[in-house]
Structure formats: structure tokens, C-alpha cells
Amino acid sequence: MSEKQLIPGLQATREAIQSGTIKISEIWIKEGRKDHRIEEIQQLAKIGSIPVSFKKSIQLDHLLPDVAHQGIIAFAQSFDYVDLNQIIRTSLNALNQALIVVADHITDEGNLGALIRAAAFFKADGLVLPKNRSARVTERVLKRSAGSSVHLPVTRVVNLGRTLDVLSKKGFWIIGATGESPESIYRFDWKRDLVLVLGSEDKGLSRAVRERCHQLVSIPAAGHVDSLNISIASGVILSEITRQRRLG
């Protein structure tokens, strides 16, 4: 990745400033853009001694030509991926409450951004991405996640299969989501240290990942549509995990 990361959008910029974990060197705002959200960001930038510049719309479009930046871009340090062991240590602090999400070669940036947002919303301990044949955290992903990436540790690994072997040896249950499984997410007992593996929309779980799963689960359909977008599916499953754990 480059030394600088561009963070587009109002929510993503605000979250990045407020997190205090990302060093922001400058913020660009489109000339004439004035509303309470822009004013809030300007105030936060002033408190954090972050320079703010007003630029023509064409200048922002030139930086991010295919991203809906909403008239604001923050210049930050490159995205900081964490070490897998850091996620493992953090997640195992709460007995039978560990939750790590694994994205099995999800290449669509929009889906990855939405998955990050869902995982952060339901307080997952971290997200694992493969280094090859997978989307990474880019400007589009940051925009789609609406700044949620600052609340979710993300790691990249060379081999998902070996990574799942490591997690299994650490005591995690490896649970894969796949549409053809007869085991409903509503019958499965989620009150354990677990890894939730989600596959791409077009290919699903890869064979190497599927073979390492202790259990495969599915979301039972009630209508005529036989599958869900990965971002929606992740939200449904993570919601059920949270519901069961709160019930004790």
C-alpha cells in the first residue's frame, strides 16, 4: 500500500478523527459545502490540530474519481493491519465469547466494506482476510464501512487453511456459512469461542476452508429467493450470535 490512505466520506472521516488511533495529516472539503456535519468535522479537526483546506470539486474528484466522497477527504496514514496473534489474544480474554470473522476470498470491495461494518456493529474481535485473491482495505472499502474499520482489527494471512488450523488448535470452533447446510443458524449453539467463515457470493466457501469447518450452517429461507448478499447474510448471522449470547 502507499504511505498515505485517503478516507472519503463524512462518517468515515468523523470516525477516523474521533478514534484517535489514525494519524490524519490534512482534510480537504469541497468549496461551498456547508452543513452541520461539515461544521462538526471542522470543529473536531480544530481540536485535533488537523489542517483543513477547501478545494474545488474537480480536485476531490481527481483524487477519488470513482468514489462517492461526499465532498470531503481525509489524508491519513496507511491502513494498519494487525497481527493474527493480537486478535487471538484479545478474543480469548472473554470465555466462550470470542468471535473472529474470516472472509474466504471476498473480492468485491462493496461487500467487504459492508462486512466490516456488520462485524464492527456486532463487536467481533477481528476480521481475517487472505492476502491473495481478496479485496483489501481501500478507499472504497473505507467509504462503504462508514468508518467502522477503526473499531475492528483486520489481519491479512498468506494461507487461510493453515490459519484455520491454528485457530482450531487454540480452541476455536470453525463455523462455515453455506446455503446448502441443513443446520439452521437458529438451532446451532453459538455460545462458544468461534470463528465464523463467510465465502464469496459467486463461489461460496473454498474446499480447503470447508474441510476445516467443524460445522456448516445456513440461514433458512422463508420466501422464493434462495440466497442473500454476503453483507446481509453476515448481519443476520452475527445478530443471531449476539442474541443467543445475551440470553446466556
Image (tube, rainbow, N blue to C red):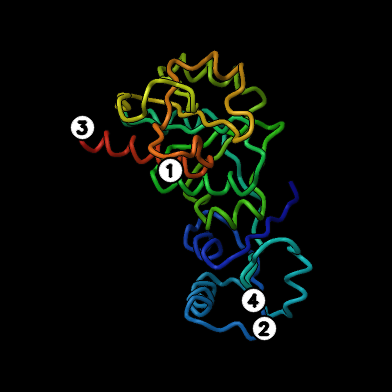
The secondary element bearing badge 2 is classed as loop
Few, some or many residues within 10 Å of mark 4 (<14, 14–19, 20+) = many
Separation (CA) of disc 4 from disc 1: 32 Å
Q: Are marks 3 and 2 in contact (CB under 8 Å)?
A: no
The residue identified by callout 1 is 235
Please name whichever residue, 212 or 151, is drawn nearer the observer in this view of the structure. Answer: 212
Please name whichever residue, 114 or 142, is drawn nearer the observer in this view of the structure. Answer: 114
Q: Amino acid at mark 4?
A: Ile
N-terminal label among 4 and 1: 4
Is 66 placed left or right of 160 in the picture? right
The residue identified by callout 4 is 29
Separation (CA) of disc 1 from disc 2: 37 Å
Above-or-below relation of 185 to 147 = above
The residue identified by callout 2 is 31
The secondary element bearing badge 4 is classed as strand
Residue 212, percent from left and from top: 52, 15
Q: Are marks 4 and 2 in contact (CB under 8 Å)?
A: yes
Q: Are marks 4 and 3 in contact (CB under 8 Å)?
A: no
The residue identified by callout 3 is 248
Separation (CA) of disc 4 from disc 3: 47 Å
Above-or-below relation of 85 to 16 = above
N-terminal label among 4 and 3: 4
The mark closer to the camera, 4 or 1, is: 1
Query: What residue lies at 38% left-to-right and 21% top-to-bottom?
Result: 183
Separation (CA) of disc 3 from disc 1: 20 Å
N-terminal label among 1 and 2: 2
Location of the C terminus by quadrant is: top left
Q: Amino acid at mark 2?
A: Glu
